[in-house]
Image (spheres, coloured by chain):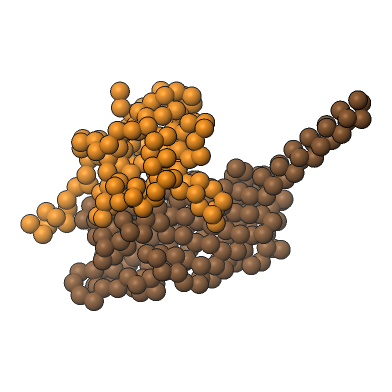
Chain colours: A orange, B brown
Amino acid sequence: MGLYLFNMPHRDVQNTKTDFSLTSSALVAEYLTDQNAANEKYLAADGESKILEVSGTVSKISENFNGQKVVLLKDQSDKAGVSATFTEETAEQVSAIQVGQTIRIKGVIRSGATYDQDLGLYENVILEKSAIVK
Amino acid sequence: MKTKVFLTTALFLLVTATTFAQNSEKLVSSNTHIRFFSTTPAEDIEANNYTSTGALTKTSGEVVFSVPMQGFEFEKRLMQKHFNNKDFLDTQEFPRARFVGKITNLDAVDFSKDGTYNANVEGEMTIKGKTNPVKESGTVTVKGNTAQVKSVFGITLADYGITFVKGKPSSNIAKTVEVTLVADFTEE
């Protein structure tokens, strides 16, 4: 039993039920209105936070230090967006999309949007283990 | 009429130039890697995070990092759950760690010339709601309008109220963990 727990595999985000479906604008607005309430709603105490399906306009496609594809969903009128990191398995989906396209992404939320005074920047919502939902 | 057009143009150019000057003073980073590494005779534990945001102001040397704590990924699921829970980092209550500081030897870092410069940084680190003064060093590699920042430093967990008195964590997690930071900065 102890060994089983020790070797317990990570949660398979893509094969776990979606908790909330919403637009990138709505999610960002929820965070910018009341960060604490949004954290309470979306973040779990053990780090296995809510699984979201977020739809929005692709505004940037990049790659991180881990070689993973990162897609930013952000409407032009919004101050922050939703940054979604794809996995090795789902990276290929990203090559088929373009900036300006409207898509829906499923992933696990890691942190919310906020205006950080010290940074002088709006931080995006972060999703990881992402995949495009048809 | 001609004077008016001239003045309007001049004003426009001035405003544009000022805006550009302000923008290029500040570099931002959304491509970051923060790794923490703990080693004890019992085991080595590593976690990686690619989700942080940084800002670097060339003229003042101000450096800021915001680190989403739930972005740390461990090889073992159970370790990741422990890391996040109330007794360890309590990431639901304290979703971000942050560093706000300044490069103290700014004369030694030439942002207008490509090269790698040693930088000393002093500032405040906040983890799990507790803030401590820190003094670290690292490198800034300037290439054109971009800069890559690298640093390796230690964090003593007890300084941030993270302590273990019994059980596996007390023997398997180092008192001081090693943190490695790499961040690519570009113009906004």
Is residue B162 visible in the rendered image? The answer is yes
Q: In this orientation, does residue B71 appear?
A: no
Residue A57 point in image, percent of width and height: 44, 28
Residue at x 49% of width, y 26% of height:
A99
Q: Is residue B108 left or right of residue B53?
A: right
Instruction: State the quadrant of the N terminus of chain B.
Output: top right
- Count every numbered label the image shows and give the total: 0
Q: Residue furthest bottom?
A: B165
**Frontmost residue, B51 versus A73:** A73
Q: Is residue B128 left or right of residue B58?
A: left
Residue nearest the viewer, comparing A10 with B28 = B28
Query: Which residue occupies 38% across, 26% down?
Result: A103
Residue B34 pos. (x, y %): 43, 55
Give the residue at x 72% y 50%: B112
Residue B13 at x, y = what percent?
80, 36
Q: Is residue A113 above or below residue B45?
A: above
Apparent side of residue B104 relative to residue A107 in the rendered image (left or right): right
Q: Nearer the viewer, residue A121 or B54?
A: A121
Q: Is residue B8 above or below residue B164?
A: above
Q: Residue furthest left?
A: A1
Residue in the foreground of this view, choosing between B23 and A2:
B23
Q: Is residue A98 left or right of residue B14?
A: left
State the quadrant of the C terminus of chain B: top right
Residue B90 in the image, given as x and y percentages of width and height: 30, 61
Name the quadrant containing residue A109.
top left
